[in-house]
Amino acid sequence: MAHALSSLITSEVCGHKDSLLQRFNSHFKTIPADTQERILQAQRIRYQVYCVENQLETTLDNPDCIETDEFDNHAIHSLIVARETGAALGTVRLVMPLPSTPERAFALQRLLDASSLRALLSLPIVSMAEVSRFSISRHFRRFTTHSPESVSSVALLSNSGPLMRLGLIQGLVRMSMQHGITHWCALMEPTLLRMLAAMAIRFKPIGPMVEFRGLRQPCYIDLSEMLNAVMYERPNFWGMITDGGSLRACGEASAVDSPSRRRSPARA
């Protein structure tokens, strides 16, 4: 994911005639996985990514070719679909807070030491959600993004992974706005954290790094602060992840006040 986002940042620095949002909307859309069939689509994508393409989970634990866990019981999901075919290509979920038992809401809590747990619980835990299962299938993308007649678009769509990842972030923002989520927590690779920071998405650490499929950093971010920073520093990315400004967090500055309206931003 980090390499893909790096490519997208480079392409934006070089410039493009269409905005990121226009490019995304030409080929994809994000939809909520708000039915049982859509949730199953999300879990099939997760199986393909986590059990087949990357083998992070075992197929023996997921015999029905879906990847699921106990946190799906209190999670919400989003899908990216190809406009031309309607095929689901990627998914992400937000594990929602458990107000009655906040100490057991998120998977990352099982990896934190006592001090880090206290730090997490000192945050607004009842309006926090855990970002996880961020997945785009290479297999589904290759075979179901376009119909056989649209051969001319194959090259464009085969390089669309970074754009789709921004689409999943848009899905996270949308779900957060709809469900009153103000903060995200996550377990992330250090390289990914640096890449997101280059996009003005700056997660803060929760204690030291932990071992989980390699070193990972438990971290969190204030959604309103993040959207404000992206709007001022990376307005093109802001337009993409807020669906043209239609997704707004409580406390986020008005788009009218954006530096892009008053002066040319330092970085596009």
Image (tube, grey):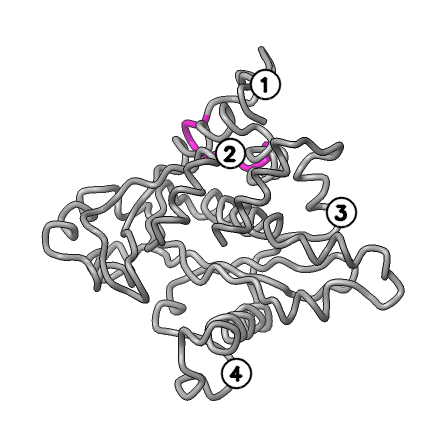
- Residue where numbered disc 4 is placed: 65
Foreground: disc 2 or disc 4: 4
In the image, residue 181 sits, relative to residue 69, either above or below, namely above
Secondary structure beneath dot 1 equals helix
Image x and y of residue 116, in percent: 16, 50
Foreground: disc 1 or disc 2: 1
Mark 3–mark 4 distance (CA, rounded to whole Å): 31 Å
Q: Residues within 10 Å of mark 1 (few under 14, many from 20)?
A: some
Q: How many marks?
A: 4
Residue lying at 77% horizontally and 64% vertically, measured from the top left: 85
Query: Could you say which disc has been placed on residue 180 in the image?
Result: none
Query: Could you say which disc has been placed on residue 26 in the image?
Result: 3
- Residue where numbered disc 1 is placed: 260
Q: Are marks 3 and 1 in contact (CB under 8 Å)?
A: no
Residue at the far left in the pictured view? 114
Splitting the image into 4 quarters, where does residue 111 fall? bottom left
Residue lying at 44% horizontally and 76% vertically, measured from the top left: 55
Foreground: disc 2 or disc 3: 3
Q: Nearer the viewer, residue 115 or 175?
A: 115
User: Which image quadrant: the C terminus?
Assistant: top right
Image x and y of residue 8, in percent: 59, 43
- Residue where numbered disc 2 is placed: 248
Helix, strand or loop: magenta stretch: loop
Mark 2–mark 4 distance (CA, rounded to whole Å): 36 Å
Splitting the image into 4 quarters, where does residue 80 fall? bottom right
Q: For the residue marked with disc 2, what is the amino acid?
A: Arg
